[in-house]
Image (cartoon, rainbow, N blue to C red):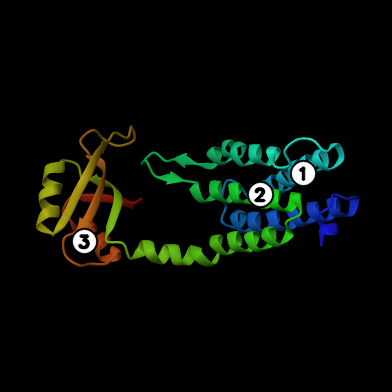
Amino acid sequence: MLEIRELTVTAIVVRILVAVILGGIIGMERGMKNRPAGLRTYMLVCVGACVVMMINQYTYQVYGVGDPVRLGAQVVSGIGFLGAGTIIVTSHNQIKGLTTAAGLWASACIGLAIGIGLYEIAVVGGAAVFLSLTVLHGWDYYMRSKTRIIDAYIELDTGVSLGTFLRNARDADLAVSDVQLERDPGIAEETASFLATVKGKKKMSQIQLIQALKKLEGVKYLEVL
């Protein structure tokens, strides 16, 4: 069993190929959803982490000195700069890219496992990451659709004040909180635009909550964040 863990020419080729395959599979799913990091990015991260780990193993195996996981630890912490680059905050304070960043970090960890020869962990971990990004995506959407609280960006008709909107929302059994006024250069000064958290006082689904908001007098535009 130890033979397949030793760093040989055959092992190097096998590990890099496995890193290419697993990293590519994960990245392919992200690329199909048009995310900032796709097939090549995930593949490069996984292969790079694998190479770093093999360098660490080679140094320890040949020279008999050093910590066999020291370089791997630097990868785990250092991959953060790449993940941070995929996280963006939109003009309405909506955060995007967290899943992509987490996927990159997980892809690097899988590469480390391949690089040290832990094929079983790499394959099972890679499958778990892929399933999380694909199968569980639908479940995540389903759970979000069932929430009774939404964060929304709202624009009111010209001349309609925020106070009027709040009174209308209260009359419709909607609780509005965390209101943050926005100032968009493309919107007339007379038009009120803001971010708010809205919750139904009565039992209602997310779709019913959105419909109730749209029906409020003076609501010109509504975007769920």
Tell me the residue at 49%/47% (across/down). Answer: 98
* Screen quadrant of the N terminus: bottom right
Residue position marked by numbered label 1 in the rendering: 51
Q: Which amino acid does label 2 sit on?
A: Tyr
Pinpoint residue 34: horizontal percent, then vertical percent: 57, 52
Viewer-proximal residue among 93 and 162: 93
Considering the numbered disc 1 on the image, is that residue within a helix, a strand or a loop?
helix
Q: Is residue 169 left or right of residue 1?
A: left
Relative placement, left or right, of 114 versus 37 is: right
Say which quarter of the image contains residue 44: top right
- Residue type marked 3: Ala
Work out whether mark 2 precedes mark 1 in sequence or the reverse, and give the earlier one. 2
Q: Which of marks 2 and 1 is in front?
A: 1
Q: Which residue lies furthest to the right in this view?
A: 9
Mark 2 residue element: helix
Tell me the tag on residue 3: none
Q: In which quarter of the image is residue 185?
A: top left
The correct choice, above or below, for 100 with respect to 125 in the image is above
Query: Badge 3: few (under 14), some or many (20 or more) residues near its Cα, within 10 Å?
Result: some
* Residue, disc 3: 212
Any mark on residue 42, and which? 2
Across and down, in percent, residue 207 comes to 29, 65
Which sits in the foreground, 148 or 51? 51
Which label's residue is closer to the chain start, 3 or 2? 2
Q: How far apart are marks 3 and 2 (CA)?
A: 42 Å
Judged by depth in the image, the label closer to the viewer, 1 or 3, is 1
Q: How far apart are marks 2 and 1 (CA)?
A: 14 Å
Q: Which amino acid does label 1 sit on?
A: Val
